[in-house]
Image: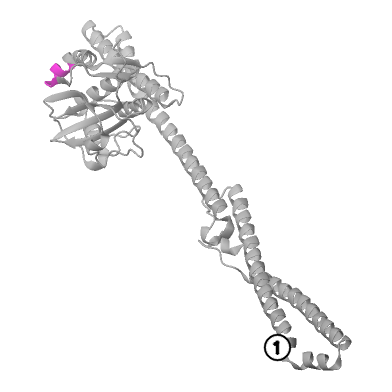
């Protein structure tokens, strides 16, 4: 196809010699036909005048033939009409031929695209009357190309996910088997046996956490994910979540603070999914918030997301057109992240420098699960550094005013 249409390699189409010759030939044929028709009419006109003059009186006939204003005026009009028709016919043939060639190029592009060359685009500057067709084809190919890239990215992500999870599960599983083998040994003392069982038990909990993360992540990717939404009063909901982490935060020497304003603030949400979201964010802060003395869980209303001054790390392409929002935040005053990391931490299996350098184990799926569950609620989530604190901010459509808490 490229050999037949070498200009397809260019960003814009140019006529080759064959196509130029085709236009010239069509112009010559058209000009010849119009000229032939003109000559036929011209000579017919002369014959009619001569015949008419011969039938008249000699003096009248001589006056007509010798008077330019009478005889040549008709010839002048014929010539003007001839030039006008010839010009129109030539322009029509040029436009028609170029349009036919442009359509032929478009068909050639479509043929190449159908063979798998999805990066080709129809040059719009040569599409002529088919500009809208060329634009529609290019938009369609952009969509197809993006869909294929997304599919390939998803396949690579899935393979990487399985490799990472397989490695993460195999490591504690090997430890469990090893310690249980030691515990089974009759020569092992009771004290050592108890220690080995304790280690095996802890490793088993690590595997359970990995499996739970994998299950939640895959379920959050499902396009048909079902949310069981209710209008929930946020104050008791968040206080209960904080109470669940009381012992863990005390063990880390971190104060866990809740701040819901106003206290009667409600949110239409799936309580189980949102509990998982908060669990992941608080767990993340406890694990990787090095040097943190306080973790704050906040909730407050907002009428306009633009007023929040969204940071560059917020990669929201289209803000959900909702007039009333609830903003949820989990913030800590521990070690901060770089701007580049703020853009990536919600990617599956991405680990920041904090998590890579931490002794705490994790699947790397926690923040991806947060992002997917928030998006399932038609909300947005992003991370930023604000007032020397690392902030995870979630923006969710507020409960309808007529909704009442369950």
The part of the chain drawn in magenta is 248-256
Q: Is residue 247 above or below residue 16?
A: above
Task: Quadrant for residue 395, please give it.
Answer: top left
What residue do we see at 78% from left, 75% from top? 37
Q: Nearer the viewer, residue 37 or 202?
A: 37
What residue do we see at 55% from left, 53% from top? 134
Q: Nearer the viewer, residue 267 or 283?
A: 267
What residue do we see at 16% from left, 36% from top? 386
Q: Is residue 118 visible?
A: no
Q: Is residue 40 above or below residue 336?
A: below
Residue holding disc 1: 69
Residue 339 position, x and y percent, is 23, 42
Q: Quadrant of the C terminus?
A: top left
Instruction: Tell me the colour scheme of the image.
Output: one colour
Task: Quadrant for residue 212, please give it.
Answer: top left
Q: In the picture provided, is 149 more to the left or to the right than 366? A: right
Q: Is residue 105 visible?
A: yes
Q: In the picture provided, is 286 more to the left or to the right than 406? A: left
Residue 79 position, x and y percent, is 70, 81
Task: Quadrant for residue 381, please give it.
Answer: top left
In magenta stretch: residue 141: no
Q: Is residue 117 above or below residue 265?
A: below
Q: In the picture provided, is 321 more to the left or to the right than 357? A: right
């Amino acid at each position: 196809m490229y050999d037949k249409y070498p200009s397809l390699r260019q960003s814009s189409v140019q006529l080759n010699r064959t196509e130029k010759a085709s236009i010239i030939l069509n112009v010559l044929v058209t000009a010849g036909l119009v000229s032939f028709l003109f000559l036929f009419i011209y000579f017919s006109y002369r014959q009619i005048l001569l015949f008419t003059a011969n039938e008249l009186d000699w003096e009248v006939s001589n006056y007509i033939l010798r008077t330019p204003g009478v005889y040549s005026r008709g010839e002048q009009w014929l010539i003007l009409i001839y030039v006008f028709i010839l010009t129109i016919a030539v322009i029509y043939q040029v436009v028609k031929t170029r349009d036919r060639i442009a359509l032929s190029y478009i068909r050639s592009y479509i043929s190449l695209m159908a063979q798998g060359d999805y990066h080709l685009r129809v040059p719009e500057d040569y599409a002529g009357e088919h500009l809208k067709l060329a634009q529609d084809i290019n938009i369609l190919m952009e969509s197809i190309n993006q869909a294929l890239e997304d599919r390939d990215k998803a396949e690579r992500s899935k393979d990487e996910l399985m490799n990472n999870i397989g490695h993460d599960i195999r490591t504690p599983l090997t430890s469990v088997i090893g310690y249980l083998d030691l515990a089974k040994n009759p020569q092992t003392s009771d004290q050592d046996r108890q220690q080995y069982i304790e280690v095996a038990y802890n490793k088993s909990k690590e595997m359970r956490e990995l499996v739970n993360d994998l299950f939640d992540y895959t379920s959050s990717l499902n396009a048909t994910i079902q949310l069981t939404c209710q209008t929930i009063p946020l104050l008791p909901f968040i206080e209960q979540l904080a109470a669940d982490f009381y012992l863990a935060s005390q063990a880390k020497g971190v104060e866990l603070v809740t701040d819901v304003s106003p206290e009667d603030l409600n949110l239409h949400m799936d309580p189980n999914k949102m509990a998982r979201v908060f669990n992941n964010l608080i767990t993340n802060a406890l694990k990787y918030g090095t040097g943190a003395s306080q973790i704050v869980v906040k909730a407050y209303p907002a009428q306009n997301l633009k007023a929040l001054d969204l940071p560059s790390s917020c990669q929201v392409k289209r803000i959900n057109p909702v007039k009333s929002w609830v903003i949820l935040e989990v913030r800590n005053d521990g070690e901060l992240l770089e701007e580049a990391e703020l853009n990536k931490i919600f990617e599956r299996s991405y680990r920041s420098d904090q998590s890579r350098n931490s002794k705490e184990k994790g699947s790397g799926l926690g923040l991806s699960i947060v992002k997917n569950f928030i998006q399932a609620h038609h909300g947005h989530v992003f991370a930023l550094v604000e007032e020397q604190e690392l902030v995870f901010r979630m923006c969710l459509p507020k409960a309808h005013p007529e909704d009442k808490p369950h």
